[in-house]
Image (cartoon, coloured by chain):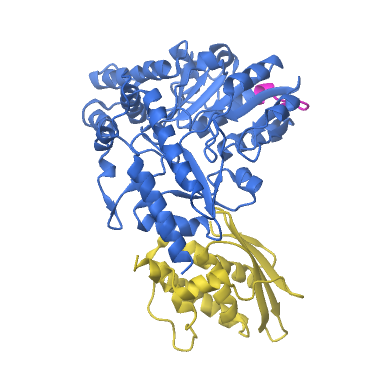
Amino acid sequence: MTDLRELYQDVILDHNRHPRNFRMPQCHNHKAQGVNPLCGDEVQIYLQLNEAGIIEDISFQGRGCAISTASASIMTETLKGRSVDEADTYFSAFHQLVTGEGGRAAAELDFSKLEVLGGVAAYPARVKCATLAWHTVQAALHQNNEKITTE
Amino acid sequence: MTSAALDVDSVRADFPILKQQVHGRPLVYLDSGASAQKPEVVIQAVSDYYQRDHSNVHRGVHTLSQRATAAYEAVREKVCTLLNAARTSEIIYVSGTTAAINLVAQTYGRANLSVGSEVLVTEMEHHANIVPWQIACELSGATLKVVPFHDNGVLDLDQYRTMLSDNTRIVAVTHISNTLGTINPMTEMIRLAHDVGAVVLVDGAQAVPHMTVDVQALDCDFYAFSAHKLYGPTGFGILYGKESLLEAMPPWQGGGDMIKQVRFAQTTYNDLPYKFEAGTPHIAGAVGLGAAIDYVSGHGLGQIAAHERALLDYAQAQASAVSGLQVFGTAPDKAAVLSFELDGIHAHDVGTVLDHEGVAVRAGHHCAMPVMEHFGVAATVRASFGMYNNYDDVDALFAGIARTKDLMSA
């Protein structure tokens, strides 16, 4: 069971049980829904961008497994206060992290929280769980109000 | 056929794939509802066919073509016996249950459905017995109606009686629910449908591997199943249909083998069953199914059903002792399937932890999203049994469930 704890680290289990920014926001100007048709998981992401293109608020709703819930929760903590360009950079780096492609994240990125999801790379069937929320943010930022799927 | 109880140890020894470890643990395969494993005799039959007899069927005078055709057609007799059909012309080779249902929806359905007519399906159907009817209804203007089930997974027969009417043209219903395990009361449902003049298509994908099916006793109009759930190859299956209905139906796919004569002015279609078998078929699939039918019949479907029922009872007794475990589908008449949810733990997480214990289960919506919706869940875990499973497999499942709870609440 020791290698399973690489996937289900305490931080992930904590985010699963107590997801951060798991709420319907008072106001938002970008949103998107993501679904994983294989398992029926779904997530709604709400973003409030200011005029400078900074993510002032980000929150989510939905239901999913421990990996997708924790990933969404950690993502909201990571992206809050960042610009749209930075969000894109984090998305690419996170995608590389969980698919096991590429090396370490660039030094300028704060991966302290995201790194706990690195264990997903050993579970190809679960990569979609980890990336669902991130794909949904991309949709919210770049193709507003689109419904996206991981398929 | 033997009347002795199934010798599970000897059955297990016949399945090469079971002799392996997954994540350092002996493989415990509890996903036969998705696809069953293959005994050595099936693998060997397919291999022998390709090594010795392969050629195209119904096309040549040479020796190999005759051998391939003989092997291919002999399986029709075996299927005929398995289902107790009246004649081999009623046994149509298709690629699987899904293709069988689509064939009926696109031929019988489109010829007999129109505005004002109705198709009845149930809330517990697999998507393969929902979507083809949605398409047929959309094309014809007919209405699709859904017979609900009770919370224990038993179909609401009162509702069924109420929903049947002179407008009902087709009832499409699963013999055994792939998610709930419910065995539906087919004989009564078919009689009631016939009383209003409707025909009945039975989705037998989950039933044929787990019980004796007699299409004449059922008096069903169409019956569909897949070889791969009956320990045979993927990509092959059977549509049974009453001869009078099949004769009256327009063909589905056009091509070689389904014609007698092709002229640009007019083409004459072939006789049954070939009218519905266009193109070069999955010959090895048929050969493998033949070997699988011999294997299963040799052990006796009655014995297999009794063994699987004992496993299910054993599993359900253990399930009831696990706190936070909810079973979906508790019909008294039930087969081979245990669907459940662990409180606060997503099915995918359960599936991943169980996989680490060597236990293969299905986690997801099981291609039955309306069933998930009924219970307000996104996904369930499903353990499904086959003839090779034993009590140790069930114990391994529940040991894995205990580990899942430990890990996820850590």
- Residue B266 in view (yes/no): no
The chain assigned the colour blue in the figure is: B
At x 43% / y 27%, what residue is drawn?
Answer: B279
Q: Is residue B234 magenta?
A: no
- Give the left or right position of residue B229, taking residue B123 as reference: left
Q: Is residue B96 above or below residue A16?
A: above
Residue depicted at x 53% and y 66%: A68
Work out whether A71 lies above or below B281.
Answer: below
Magenta part of the chain = B110-118
Q: Hue of chain A?
A: yellow
Q: Is residue B387 left or right of residue A27?
A: left
Q: Camera-side residue: B47 or B312? A: B312
- As rendered, which of B372 and A33 lies closer to the eye? B372
Residue B391, x across and y down, in percent = 35, 41
Q: Quadrant of the N terminus of chain B?
A: top left
- Residue A102 appears at what percent x and percent y? 38, 75
- In the displayed image of the protein, which residue is found farthest to the left? B52
Compared with A55, B264 (above or below) is: above
Q: Is residue B310 left or right of residue B191?
A: left
Residue A138: where, in percent of width, then height?
60, 71
Q: Outermost residue toward the bottom?
A: A108
